[in-house]
Structures are given as C-alpha cells and as structure tokens.
Image (cartoon, helix red, strand yellow):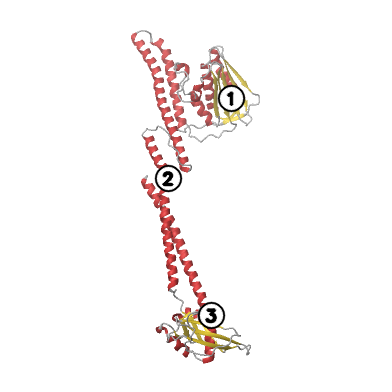
C-alpha cells in the first residue's frame, strides 16, 4: 500500500509541471512579443518625429555630410531648420534639431508664431543642460540615441552608424522594412532607421525579472501541489489500507467487526460494500457449519435407529420381518433428505431451468386438493379448497408449483392435530398476479423463529423427531422455487392459533436463465 501511495503522489508531478511549463511559456512568449511590439511602435514613433528635421536639413544643405560629421565627432548642437511648404508658400514650419551632450538627438517642432532662432550648426548652445532648455522648449519629445541611429542612402547602404563595421554595408530587408524614407521634392534621398533588433539592457532586465518571477511562482506552486498531493494520497490510501487489512483478516477467518467508514465518497461506498460482503460471507460460513452439523445430527438419528434394528435382529429379539418396516421408514426418510440436498445443490449451481407453460389455476388446485385430501383424512384432518371464480391462467412450471404447495400442505398436516383443518386458498391480486395461501389451525410458530423459518435445516422445535418434522429443507426449497418464478413467499403465525404461508406469483414470471438439471 505504501507503493500505491507513492505512485499516487508521483502522479501529481505531470499534472503540476505541465500547466506550469505551459503557462510559463505562454506568459514569457506573450510578454516578449508585447514588449517587442511596444519597442517597435516606439521606434516608429521616434522615427516619424525625426524625419521632418532630417528632410529640412537636407533641403537647406543638399547633403547630410556636415550632420554626419557632427554626430561622428559627438559634438552637441542645435540646428534651426525651416522647411518650406509646397501647398502654402507663405506658411513656414520650424523645427529645432537638438543633439545633447548625453548623445540624444531630438527634433522639436516650434510654434509658427515663435520667433526663429538664427541658423547655426555645430555650435554649443548655452542652454543644452539643466532646466533652461526644458523651460524654453517645454517637454522634449522622445528622440534617438546616437548609438542606435542608422542613416543610409536610398538603396540602403549605411552612411552613419555607431557600429563602424556596418558603414558601407547594405542593411537587411527586415531593418529596411522598419526604416523611414527621407524625401526631397518627392524623391528619396536617404533612409533613416533605428537599431532596435535587440532589446536594450532595461528591457532585458525586465524580461529577466519576469523569468525569475515565473520560476519562483512555479517552484512555489510545485512544492505546494506536491505537499497537497502527499496529503491527498495519504487520505486516499488510508481506506485502501484498511480494506487490505480487512481482506487479510477475512481470509484468515479473524473477522470480528465491520471496517469503519471514514470517507464519504466511492471509497466509503466500497468499504460499506465490503462490510456487507464480509457479513454475508460470515453468515454463509456460519450457515454452512450449522448445515453440516444439522446433516450430521439428522443422519446420526436414522443410522442409530437402523443399527439398533440390526443389533436386535442379531440378538434374536426380533425377526427380520419385524424390523423391515422400521428400516424401510428410515431409508425412505434418508432418501428424501438426499433428494432435497441434491435439489438445493442444483439450484445453488444454477442448474435448474423452469419449464414454463400455461397453468389454469382452478383446475390445477382442484387436482392438488384431491391428491392431498386422502392424506389429510387418514390423519383425521380436513383439507379445504377456497378459490375465487376469476382465477387467471399463469405461466409457471406445474411440477415445481406442485412441489411448492405440496411442501407447505405437508408441513401444515404435520403440525396440526386430528380434527383440525388446513385451507388452500387462491385469489387474484390488483397488480395482475395471484396469491396462494396455505393456512392451518395448528400449534403455530414462535415469533423469534419466524425470521429463520426458511433457513436450511432450521426447525422451530429441535426436540421433535425427524420423522415428524421432515428433512428441514422443504421450506428452503419452496422459497427458492417461488423466487425462480419471480414471486415472493411470506409467513405469519401465532402460537396456538395456526400458521399462514402466502405466495405471490406474477402472471408472466421472468426467471433468470439456468441450465437443465441432469
């Protein structure tokens, strides 16, 4: 059972690891894609902000060489660029192209009413640092760092880059796709791009922090799930351990008390089913032992009688002819008990099949009454037939039905004295069946004996001679045959007032299929 608990606990591992890996991969991928998208959108926005200044610069100087030289020498400057508008010649749009000492290039659009500053290139202004420039221009827009700025000719050959090895090389198609064209008179003169293919340090730190958070949360979830799994596996295996111990005790014959039901689930139902099975097995074992004892007791009595008869013949106390009647009576009784035992064993082995046929109850019961009336009259008793006029025709095995009622009538005649009467009744029921009753006015059965009256070899009066009480199997056989017909048999009795057996049979029984008896 310890192995099962470990296997059950280890089964939680894939259930925990798989969601953690999937969720972590999805979150990591979504975060990286989203961050890359934000970086790309930010780069496109910054490029759009720089294009007017670069186009104005080219319109004024017809070349980017002075600007490239200033950027390569890392010289701060402010350039006041004015770009003429083709649609409205009087209107002019002013921009400040600012390159600060910290290596950031910014294009600042100026209000049309603001007086233009003198054009100046590669000039260190007095207000490049501190709050002076911010007070003059307001909040600066996002610009581009010198180390990420790439300037190419119209065909994509690099003219300016922080990486010297790229100068003179053609940019890849992916970088060119993200670049912005610089036009003059509606003709491309250059292309401006930002080197954003690789995330910067801050962005890498953000992804690293996200990875660390995912690892920590996944590890905590794994440990919590394994702890919960260990606890759950212990709880689940506890009823199974109890069941295993119960099976061992039952196999050794040490069953004393039912197992406690500690779970309100299928395991609890399994424990309850096992308790019922164990109780039934112990009951069957007790009944088997009692049956063996009863068989031994019942066989010992006729055998002892037969032995005494033989000894009497040997001693000359009586002749063989005188002992014949007593010996024949004991042999008949033994033969009857052997036949009953064989019939019960065949029914237990499901080797009895009912031969169903239409049975008109009125005619059937009339013939049965005529047969048993002779036996009743010989003992000074009366057998009375009371049947309804509208008795139905039922599907039954006539021979087995005769055996059932014969056992009941025989018992009734055995337990009534001369002058008493036995009534055989039959009437239809409201549910479409029929009820048959055998009622006597004999000595009755004690109330404590009624629950066991159909047990094998059970006799309410143990002191009665076996010849007077039968083999002790008749009622067990009758009960099994009634159940095979799909019916039920009940008994009611009162000491000194008599006993009544009631048999409820359906019109069309559905017995379980059984093999033909040999």
SS for callout 2: helix
- Crowd rating for badge 2 (residues with CA inside 10 Å; few <14, some 14–19, many 20+): some
Depth check: 13 or 185 in front?
A: 185
Q: Is residue 2 visible?
A: yes
Res. 445 mark: none
Is residue 154 visible to the viewer in this orientation of the structure? no
Circle 2 or circle 3, nearest the eye: 3
Image quadrant containing the N terminus: top left
Which of discs 2 and 1 lies nearer the camera? The answer is 2
- Residue 498, above or below 130: above
Horizontal side of 73 relative to 95 (left or right) equals left
**Label annotation for residue 235:** 2
Q: Position of residue 335 (x, y in %)?
A: 43, 21
Earlier-in-chain disc, 1 versus 3: 3
Residue where numbered disc 3 is placed: 135
| Quarter of the rendering occupied by the C terminus | top left
Instruction: Tell me the crowding category of disc 3: few under 14, some 14 to 19, or many 20 or more residues within 10 angstroms, Cα based.
Output: few
- Along the line of sight, which residue is nearer the eye, 307 or 421? 421
* 477 versus 250 height, above or below: above
- Label 1, label 3: how many angstroms apart (C-alpha)? 115 Å
Lower sequence index among marks 2 and 1: 2
Query: Tag 3 or tag 2, which sits nearer the N-term?
Result: 3
Residue at 66% in and 24% down: 389
In depth, the one of 389 and 19 nearer the eye is 19
Secondary structure of residue under mark 1: strand
Is there CB contact under 8 Å for labels 1 and 3?
Answer: no
Percent x, y of residue 438: 56, 21
Q: Which residue is denoted by mark 1 in the rendering?
A: 436
Which residue is painted at 51% across and 75% down in the image?
A: 42
């Amino acid at each position: 059972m310890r192995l099962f608990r470990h296997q059950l606990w280890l089964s939680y591992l894939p259930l925990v690891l798989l969601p953690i890996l999937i969720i972590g991969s999805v979150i990591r991928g979504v975060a990286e894609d989203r961050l890359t998208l934000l970086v790309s959108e930010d780069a496109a926005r910054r490029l759009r902000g720089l294009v007017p200044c670069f186009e104005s610069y080219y319109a004024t100087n017809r070349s980017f060489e002075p600007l490239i030289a200033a950027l390569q020498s890392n010289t701060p400057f402010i350039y006041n660029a004015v770009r003429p508008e083709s649609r409205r010649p009087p209107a002019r749009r002013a921009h400040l192209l600012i390159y600060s000492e910290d290596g950031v290039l910014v294009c600042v659009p100026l209000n049309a009413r603001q007086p233009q500053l003198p054009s100046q290139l590669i000039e260190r202004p007095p207000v490049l640092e501190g709050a002076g420039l911010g007070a003059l221009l307001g909040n600066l827009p996002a610009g581009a760092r010198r180390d990420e700025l790439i300037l190419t000719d119209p065909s994509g050959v690099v003219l300016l880059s922080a990486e010297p090895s790229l100068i003179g090389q053609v940019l890849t198609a992916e970088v060119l796709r993200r670049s912005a064209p610089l036009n003059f008179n509606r003709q491309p003169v250059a292309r401006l791009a930002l080197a954003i293919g690789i995330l910067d340090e801050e962005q890498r730190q953000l992804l690293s922090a996200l990875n660390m958070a995912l690892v920590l949360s996944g590890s905590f979830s794994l440990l919590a799930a394994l702890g919960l799994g260990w606890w759950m596996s212990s709880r689940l295996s506890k009823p199974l351990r109890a069941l295993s111990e119960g099976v061992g005790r039952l196999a050794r014959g040490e069953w004393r008390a039912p197992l406690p039901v500690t779970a309100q689930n299928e395991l609890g139902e399994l424990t309850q089913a096992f308790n019922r099975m164990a109780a039934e097995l112990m009951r069957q074992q007790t009944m088997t032992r009692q049956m063996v004892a009863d068989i031994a007791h019942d066989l010992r009595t006729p055998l002892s009688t037969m032995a005494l008869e033989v000894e009497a013949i040997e001693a000359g106390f009586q002749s063989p002819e005188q002992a014949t009647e007593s010996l024949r009576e004991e042999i008949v009784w033994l033969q009857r008990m052997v036949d009953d035992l064989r019939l019960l064993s065949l029914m237990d082995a499901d080797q009895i099949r009912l031969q169903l046929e239409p049975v008109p109850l009125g005619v059937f019961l009339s013939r049965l009454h005529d047969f048993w009336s002779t036996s009743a009259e010989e003992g000074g008793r009366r057998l009375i037939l009371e049947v309804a006029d509208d008795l139905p025709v039922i599907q039954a095995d006539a021979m087995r039905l005769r055996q059932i009622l014969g056992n009941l009538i025989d018992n009734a005649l055995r337990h009534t004295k001369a002058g008493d009467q036995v009534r055989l009744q039959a009437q239809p029921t409201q549910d479409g069946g029929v009820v048959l009753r055998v009622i006597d006015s004999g000595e009755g059965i004690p109330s404590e004996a009624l629950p066991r009256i159909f047990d094998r070899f059970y006799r309410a009066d143990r002191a009665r001679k076996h010849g007077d009480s039968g083999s002790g199997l008749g009622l067990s056989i009758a009960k099994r045959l009634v159940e095979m017909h799909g019916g039920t048999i009940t008994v009611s009795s009162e000491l000194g007032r008599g006993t009544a057996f009631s048999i409820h049979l359906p019109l069309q029984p559905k017995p379980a299929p059984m093999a033909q008896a040999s």
